[in-house]
Image (cartoon, helix red, strand yellow):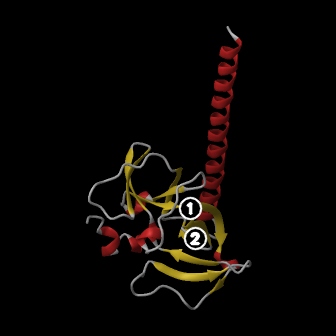
Amino acid sequence: MTTSNLDLASQTALKEHDIGARRTRLREFQARLVERMHAASTGAQATASQLGVMIGQTRWLLKLQEAGEIVSVGTITKVPLTQDWFLGLTNIRGNLISVIDLAHFRGMPPTPIDKESRIIAFAPSLSFNSGLLVSRVMGLRNVTEMEPQSDSGTADTPWALQRYLDRESQVWTELDLSLIVQDPQFLHVGL
């Protein structure tokens, strides 16, 4: 083998090792998060612990019973003649899932997709094959340690429930996925 072939082979091996290491770290993170979510949902704090996510530039809380699988953003296939906030379809473990950019749905700029972006699939119990694009998963949050705010959801967003203020003065809004799947505007993805 020539020196350039050895360099190319070693670069390829390093790249494959790096990809494998990232996948392993991602699997470990997801396994820990699933364990924590399961422990929280079966424990006494099932209603207190919620999954914290960033959607656009805002912080949201999802009920653990309504949040399904958390996956990295892969290929999203566009669907013609749909709203711009309806990003398209993706395949999650053999199931076609529609992907919604909730920030853009709410009139904000489209959510950029980067290495921290994730898709939160709706739980199977909701019987709605969809997922939300989130900017970042923030982990479990205990709402009993937050201060409820008086300016909660409005008539045009009944799925945006209670707002909370955490110890760092960050505002979190509770998102009810079972209500958003009943919102006529959310269901109307066609142009």
The correct choice, above or below, for 152 with respect to 188 in the image is: below
What residue is disc 2 on?
Answer: 57
The correct choice, above or below, for 49 with respect to 28 in the image is: below
Say which residue appears at 35% left-offset and 52% top-offset. 78
**Which of the 4 image quadrants contains residue 36?**
bottom right
Q: Do the residues labelled 2 and 1 touch (CB within 8 Å)?
A: yes
**Residue 13 or residue 68, whichever sits in front:** 13
Direction bottom: furthest residue = 150
Say which residue appears at 40% left-offset and 72% top-offset. 180
What residue is disc 1 on?
Answer: 135
**Residue 106 or residue 144, whichever sits in front:** 106
Q: Where is the C terminus found, in terms of image quarters? A: bottom left
Say which residue appears at 56% left-offset and 56% top-offset. 117
The correct choice, above or below, for 185 with respect to 136 in the image is: below
The spot of residue 126 in percent (x, y) is 39, 63
The spot of residue 18 in percent (x, y) is 67, 35
